[in-house]
Image (spheres, rainbow, N blue to C red):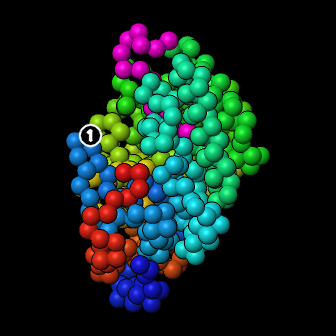
């Protein structure tokens, strides 16, 4: 299914009068408005191929129907999202769930939808049907050298797949760790993992980056071999200049100060990118901004200030991707909501008076500093984000149009009620 441009235009025309009223009100007094709108237009968030189907829990999975059965259908779904909001201009593939049979044809199909390929993702956290050795007790950390070699070879193959698709980065997330005290020698596990990562790193093309993702717990609950940002930073620092830390917002212990982590990683030049989601307890993988939108804003405040201080381009110098599990929602609607929340937090951060904030910080004027931040956060920027969509040729109200066009119903007609996205 594709959305015709005239349908977007008809939708926008029906809302244009009210939008202009809201936009003029929101834009009044905003310094550097044109520059802010351009940044909002340019800022793209990659969609992971695995997020296009209904997620699941340890207890069950309830398909919503019309899920993409192939990599081609996944690209078509991301194309639908991008047509609606012009902010999801990339797709991130998970290997081996999404190995293209014809990389050139897949790359051409993505280009037809205005998409590029973001980071490719390796998978050593589960055994595949044709896999010789098991990752039950780890992959890159495994005590068995042959198992480690199998995991290394897989990651190198993922890099090769990425090169063919035009990607320039690989994300390595390891479920490696231990369930019980005494199960693992921590020092040896770290060293084996580092040696394995060195072999993968050596296979990186000159323009490729490696993102080392961390997670505090799950599936192992006693220890994780890349358990926090410090461990990830340690690996990345030892590997070399093409290795970076990747921050997943749900991969922290409760109440972690993620905005401080972001600031320090930026300061070290080792922040590679983001997996956006939200959580109440742990790695809940909920819709971005659904639980703690203020934290999301504070993270973006550190990102904007830190990237500007280093002369970095907001849209291109870090990797931006959603990583969520849509258990009870239409996955496409959930992704539209997540992108909207990201753009809102970004827009609010762009409104922060950074000079005034730094001046207040330098004289320890705590109340003033808080007021400056909350002034930006309490500003309703939805009309600014909508205007950026309008200028980019997208829908003023993406979810409203999605429902008006009965996109999910049409996908079910095309694909069936009981389809299952590959990898889920």
x, y percent for residue 231: 54, 25
Question: Up-down: is 26 above or below 170?
Answer: below
Magenta-drawn segment: 172-185
Residue at position x 54%, y 74% in the image: 113
Q: Nearer the viewer, residue 170 or 371?
A: 170
Magenta region includes residue 313? no
Q: Which residue is mark 1?
A: 58
Q: Is residue 125 visible?
A: yes
Instruction: Decide: is 300 above or below 250.
Output: below
Please name the residue shown 29% across and 36% down the image. 281
| Magenta stretch prevailing secondary structure | loop
Q: Is residue 102 left or right of residue 274?
A: right
* Magenta segment includes 176: yes
- Left or right: residue 27 versus residue 187 is left
Q: Residues within 10 Å of mark 1 (few under 14, many from 20)?
A: few
Give the quadrant of the N terminus.
bottom left
Q: Nearer the viewer, residue 274 or 365?
A: 274
């Amino acid at each position: 299914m594709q959305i015709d441009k005239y349908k977007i235009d008809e939708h926008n025309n029906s809302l244009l009068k009210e939008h202009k009223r809201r936009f003029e009100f929101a834009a009044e007094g905003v310094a550097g408005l044109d520059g802010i709108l351009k940044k909002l237009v340019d800022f793209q968030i990659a969609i992971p191929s695995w997020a296009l189907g209904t997620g699941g829990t340890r207890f069950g999975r309830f398909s919503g129907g019309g899920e993409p059965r192939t990599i081609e259908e996944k690209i078509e779904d991301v194309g639908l999202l991008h047509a609606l909001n012009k902010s999801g201009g990339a797709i991130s593939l998970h290997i081996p769930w999404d190995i293209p049979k014809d990389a050139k044809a897949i790359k051409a199909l993505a280009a037809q939808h205005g998409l590029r390929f973001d980071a490719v993702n390796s998978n050593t956290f589960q055994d595949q049907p044709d896999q010789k050795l098991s990752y039950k007790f780890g992959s890159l950390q495994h005590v068995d050298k042959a198992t480690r070699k199998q995991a290394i070879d897989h990651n190198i193959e993922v890099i090769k797949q990425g090169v063919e698709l035009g990607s320039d980065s690989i994300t390595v997330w390891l479920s490696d760790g231990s369930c019980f005290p005494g199960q693992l020698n921590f020092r040896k596990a770290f060293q084996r993992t580092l040696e394995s990562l060195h072999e993968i790193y050596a296979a990186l093309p000159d323009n490729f980056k490696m993102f080392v993702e961390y997670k505090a717990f799950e599936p192992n609950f006693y220890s994780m071999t890349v358990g926090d940002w410090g461990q990830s930073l340690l690996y990345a620092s030892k590997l070399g200049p093409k290795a970076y830390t990747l921050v997943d917002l749900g991969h922290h212990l409760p109440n972690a100060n993620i905005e401080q982590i972001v600031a320090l990683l930026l300061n070290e030049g080792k922040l590679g990118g983001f997996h956006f989601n939200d959580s109440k307890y742990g790695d809940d993988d909920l819709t971005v901004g659904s639980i703690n939108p203020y934290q999301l804003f504070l993270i973006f405040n550190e990102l904007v200030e830190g990237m500007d201080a280093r002369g970095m381009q907001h849209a291109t110098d870090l990797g931006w991707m959603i990583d969520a599990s849509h258990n009870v929602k239409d996955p496409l609607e959930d992704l539209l909501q997540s992108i909207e929340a990201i753009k809102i937090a970004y827009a609010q951060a762009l409104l922060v008076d950074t000079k005034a904030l730094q001046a207040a910080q330098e004289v320890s004027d705590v109340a003033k500093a808080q007021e400056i931040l909350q002034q930006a956060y309490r500003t309703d920027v939805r009309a600014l984000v909508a205007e950026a969509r309008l200028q980019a040729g997208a829908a003023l109200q993406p979810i409203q149009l999605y429902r008006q066009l009965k996109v999910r119903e049409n996908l079910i007609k095309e694909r069936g009620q009981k389809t299952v996205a590959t990898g889920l």
